[in-house]
Image (spheres, rainbow, N blue to C red):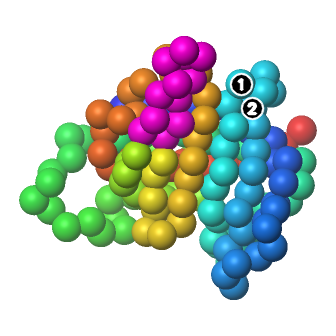
Amino acid sequence: MSELFSDTFTVTVIDRDGQQFDNVQRIEAENPNGDSKLILDINTQIYPMRLNMVFSLVLTSQISAEAPNNNQHWHPNQLKNSIATKYEYVMYGKVYRYEEESAHHKATVYISYGGLLMSLHGEQHALSLIPGSRNVYLLMREIKS
């Protein structure tokens, strides 16, 4: 697995501007240090979220130890024997924008997962691996206390 980013987040807000689409929530979350902030659209039919839910989030360029074959079409069988089996919610998307605030050593990366959008704001060094990888898997699982 080629991990680009990993952290733990707590959901702080759900649908700040009201629910825009059926079965989709826009969550806002932050990590324990408060230095990474996440806004993420979630398909709640597959993975319902709740306030104060704590979850692990990983962004990676591949989910299998095997080298990706770009000529092969994606098939659900590719998830077998992959890191994805250890997570509860998986999406595949594309980085469409990366912004740096060099003066403050901060950055924001924007990824679209088939129309479900993500904005991740944090320390520039923590997000620096993401822009070079155009295709990104998002892996999530709840951390139960």
Residue 134 placement (x, y as % from top left): 30, 45
Q: In this picture, which residue range is highlighted in magenta?
A: 98-109
Which quarter of the rendered picture does the N terminus lie within? Answer: top left
Which quarter of the rendered picture does the C terminus lie within? Answer: top right
Above or below 68: residue 33? above
Residue 77 placement (x, y as % from top left): 34, 65
**Left or right placement of residue 5 versus residue 70 in this view:** right
Q: Is residue 87 visible?
A: no
Q: In the rendering, which numbered label is found on residue 31?
A: 2
The kind of secondary structure element at disc 1 is loop
- The residue to which callout 1 is attached is 35
Q: Residue at x 67, y 81 (%)?
A: 21
Q: Residues within 10 Å of mark 1 (few under 14, many from 20)?
A: few
Q: Residue furthest bottom?
A: 22
Above or below 141: residue 102? above
Q: Is residue 99 visible?
A: yes
Residue 117 placement (x, y as % from top left): 54, 60
Q: Residue furthest front?
A: 103
**Left or right placement of residue 32 versus residue 52 in this view:** left
- Could you tell me how far apart the alpha carbons at marks 2 and 1 are, in whole angstroms? 7 Å
Quarter occupied by residue 63: top left
Q: Which of 62 and 129 lies nearest the eye of the viewer?
A: 129
Amino acid type of the residue that numbered disc 1 sits on in the rendered structure:
Asp
Q: Residues within 10 Å of mark 2 (few under 14, many from 20)?
A: some
Amino acid type of the residue that numbered disc 2 sits on in the rendered structure:
Asn
Above or below 32: residue 55? below
Q: Main structural element of the magenta stretch: helix, strand or loop?
A: strand
20 in magenta: no
Quarter occupied by residue 41: bottom right
Counting every numbered tag in the picture gives: 2
> Looking at the image, do the residues carrying marks 2 and 1 touch, with CB atoms under 8 Å apart?
yes
Q: Residue at x 29, y 34 (%)?
A: 132
